[in-house]
Amino acid sequence: MKPTKPVPYRHRPQGLTILYEDQDIIVIDKSAGLLTVKANYEKQRTAQQILTDYIRKGNPKSRKHIFVVHRLDRETSGVLVFAKSFKAMENLKQQWSSVIKKYLAVVHGVLTEKSGTITSYLAENADYEVFSVEDPAKGELARTKYRVIKEAKKFSLLEIELLTGKKNQIRVHFFENGHPIVNDDKYGNKGKIGGRLALHSQSLTFNHPHTGKRLTFEAKVPEYFDTFFDTK
């Protein structure tokens, strides 16, 4: 399947980078600070709105739509895939449990266990805060696999594989294990260092919804992450 033809500059999306596009999907590198979809209390533009305008190419009568497959938190950057049709969206959602989802995160402290899998049952309270519960009947199973790939005196860089995809899962799991993600103002107790949330969706691997071909898309690691491990 051939990718779609280049779009005139005036219609290209601003505020995000398109990694791949064809007639079924659009894969982007979302910047930190950009919402995936609109929330009731938000007025700013979202990745979904930007891409909808992009595929309509300035035609206000166009009925083309962008369909949401999954989401990234506002302050999380990296790979995000959207569908261009309901059929493609349904296909991707049906296979989502087998999609390989890898992240990078900078966390506070040095981990005793350099690799492992964190497992808990997650629930959400009335204030939209997610937390682990002991009773499986009161939460949803969440599993987060990780390994340490770099360390400094006060920080660790982790490669994370999301084995389940629950709301705020990565942030909650490392906060509850005593190593919150740097600059997490919701699930953190270490204070702001300066800069954004140090969580990045590094790659997604899934089957193309039309061809079935196995695809992997990667987003460049933000240079900001390197500042915690600068040895100069």
Image (spheres, grey):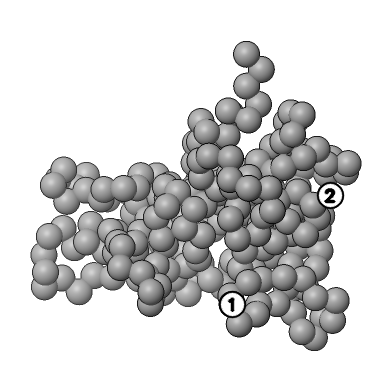
Which residue carries the number 2 mark?
116
**Amino acid at circle 2:** Gly
Which comes before the other along the chain, label 1 or label 2?
Answer: 2
- Viewer-closest of 147 and 125: 125
Q: Tell whether 29 sits left or right of 8.
A: right
Which residue carries the number 1 mark?
127
Label placed on residue 25: none
Q: Residue 96: x and y, percent?
A: 59, 66
Q: Around disc 2, counting alpha carbons within 10 Å, would you say few (fewer than 14), some (14 to 19), or many (20 or more)?
A: few
**Amino acid at circle 1:** Asp
Q: Tell whether 66 sits left or right of 202.
A: left
Q: Around disc 1, counting alpha carbons within 10 Å, would you say few (fewer than 14), some (14 to 19), or many (20 or more)?
A: few
Q: CA distance from mark 1 to mark 2?
A: 30 Å
Residue at position x 62%, y 13% in the image: 232
Q: Residue 143: x and y, percent?
A: 76, 62
Q: Residue 58: x and y, percent?
A: 12, 60
Q: Tell whether 160 sits left or right of 134.
A: left
Q: Could you say whether the residue bearing mark 2 is in a helix, strand or loop?
A: strand
Q: Work out whether 65 lies above or below 192.
A: below
